[in-house]
Image: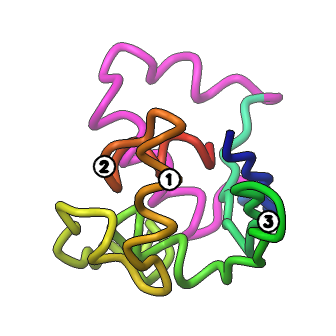
Amino acid sequence: MTHIEAFLTVKVAERGSSEWAACRAAYLARFSGAEPMSEVGDFKFVAVKVTGAWQVAGLDAARSIDGNEIRLVLGSSKQPSEGWKLKKKDRLEDLPNIGKSIAADLRGSGILSPEQLSRQTH
């Protein structure tokens, strides 16, 4: 069974900053009815950055995963606020540093696609 631990950094956007405004605009684009709630004084927007992960795929099959590699799996090489997306990979073998052996281990644990792998790191 594969076990993955993700390492994150979290930054709270300062109310009134350009970062806060961008987060709010993205949030309201998805949840248009939430505008009044976003005005409440203790409502916060946070930026979550995946800085790395640790994958254990079995005996003698552990490795560190760089944050950039994880963002490639998730479909973005930059922070989400930068809005630039890479083409998503369709096969596990197409991901950086994942060969046929690791892809087979992942499939054996029920992870059949890069999309499923990205959900395991959230």
Classify mark 3: helix, strand or loop.
Answer: strand
Q: Which residues are magenta?
A: 15-42
- For the point 62% across and 49% down, the residue is 121
Q: CA distance from mark 1 to mark 2?
A: 29 Å
Disc 3 residue type (three-letter): Trp
Q: CA distance from mark 3 to mark 2?
A: 19 Å
Q: Residues within 10 Å of mark 3 (few under 14, many from 20)?
A: some
Nearer to us in this view, 104 or 48: 104
> Which residue shows up at 70% across the image and 50% down it?
46
Tell me the quarter of the image containing the C terminus: top right
- Between label 1 and label 2, give the one nearer the viewer: 2
Residue 22 lies in magenta, yes or no?
yes
Q: Total label count?
A: 3
**Amino acid tagged 1:** Cys
Measure the alpha-carbon separation of dots 3 and 1: 29 Å
Q: Does residue 77 appear left or right of residue 44 in this picture?
A: left
Label 1: which residue?
23
Name the spot of residue 48 as percent of width and height, x first.
68, 58
Name which residue type carries label 2.
Ser
Question: What label sits on residue 54 in the rendered view?
Answer: 3
| Mark 2 lies on residue | 113
Of 40 and 91, the residue lying toward us: 91
